[in-house]
Image (tube, rainbow, N blue to C red):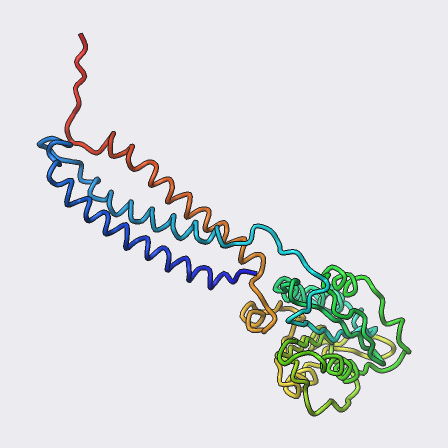
Amino acid sequence: MVDPQQLIYSAAVIALLALILTAIGEWLHLRRIRRIEKLAFGEEGPQLWTRLAPLLRCLAVTMLAGGLWVLAHLESKPPEIDPDKEPSQHLLVALDVSPSMYLEDASEKRNQRRGERASDVLEALFSRLDMTRTRVSVIAFYTEAMPVVLESFDINVVRNVLNALPMEHAFEPGQTQLQKGVEEALKYAKPWPKETATLVVVSDGDTVDGALPRQIPISIADVLVIGVGDPHKGSPVAGRTSRQNKQALERLAVRLKGRYHDGNTKHLPSDLVRSLSMAVPSIQDQTFLRDLALAITGIGGTIIGLLPLCLARFGSRRKVVVITS
């Protein structure tokens, strides 16, 4: 997938080269037309605005060069996914599926289930995945931990798992064991190459304490802990009160050498998502860049096309008199 920042940089270089060449050409052109200026425009000379013509041509060529360069290098269609191709990046999600994730105290209005909120927050990551080189795995945890999706190249499968499966029924009832979900995820990531995986832990933090592995596999490049649920006001579940244990999740992020984000009311910041090793430019970024390039190219082409007509019709001070017999 094309990196918009790199593409903008290269387009700027091409546009600058085009500007320099056009400016040299305009300078040579001005030297030549000075000799025949009176012949072309009469004793009165050209209109004052025509002095802007060289600048307008330079601007138009610069816009055309930069815009066409961007359009030529943007992908016209999504690349095809080869399921047999070895992935170079992994997104590993440790997902809390305990009954407390069904409590409706998420979002600013406190009317959304915690699990639904988690899915919404994760969309910011999914939109940044290049599925031609990334595989997604989901480890669900409650009283135990088990893999639900392993190295999938179809992001829609992952979305369905997050939104539609009542996975808590696959576990024995009891206390949530967050550390088991993290342990299972880290265990699964061990065989992967160095710094090729991003671990995302999604939970409300309503869990019993437990020990975590002292060492993180070298395959883990980034760790992100996302908290959902109201961290201030508890909600009843199974005869007790549950709320997001923000402090526990922050400690978990520190122990995993990662970052914590309170996703209950805020989506993932763009800067945070872009900083992850597996993140690539979003489709929205490329769409905006394509629209901008089309607009710039259209403006440049319009200037190039209309300028000769305007010079011919409105460039001279001399009035043309038509004599009819």
Q: Residue at x 74, y 82 (%)?
A: 182
Against 83, residue 296 (above or below) is: above
x then y, percent, for residue 147: 81, 74
Quadrant hosting residue 162: bottom right
x then y, percent, for residue 160: 78, 61
| Front residue (pair 98, 185) | 185
Left or right: residue 172 versus residue 126 is right
Q: Residue furthest top?
A: 325
Quadrant hosting residue 306: top left
Q: Residue at x 43, y 53 (%)?
A: 69
Q: Residue at x 83, y 64 (%)?
A: 165
x then y, percent, for residue 257: 62, 85
For the C terminus, which image quadrant? top left
Against 87, residue 191 (above or below) is: below
Q: Residue furthest left?
A: 43
x then y, percent, for residue 144: 84, 80
| Front residue (pair 111, 165) | 165
Against 251, residue 313 (above or below) is: above
For the N terminus, which image quadrant? bottom right
Against 306, residue 261 (above or below) is: below
Number of numbered discs on residues = 0
Left or right: residue 266 versus residue 18 is right
Left or right: residue 275 versus residue 226 is left
| Front residue (pair 98, 103) | 98
| Front residue (pair 281, 100) | 281
Left or right: residue 246 versus residue 271 is right
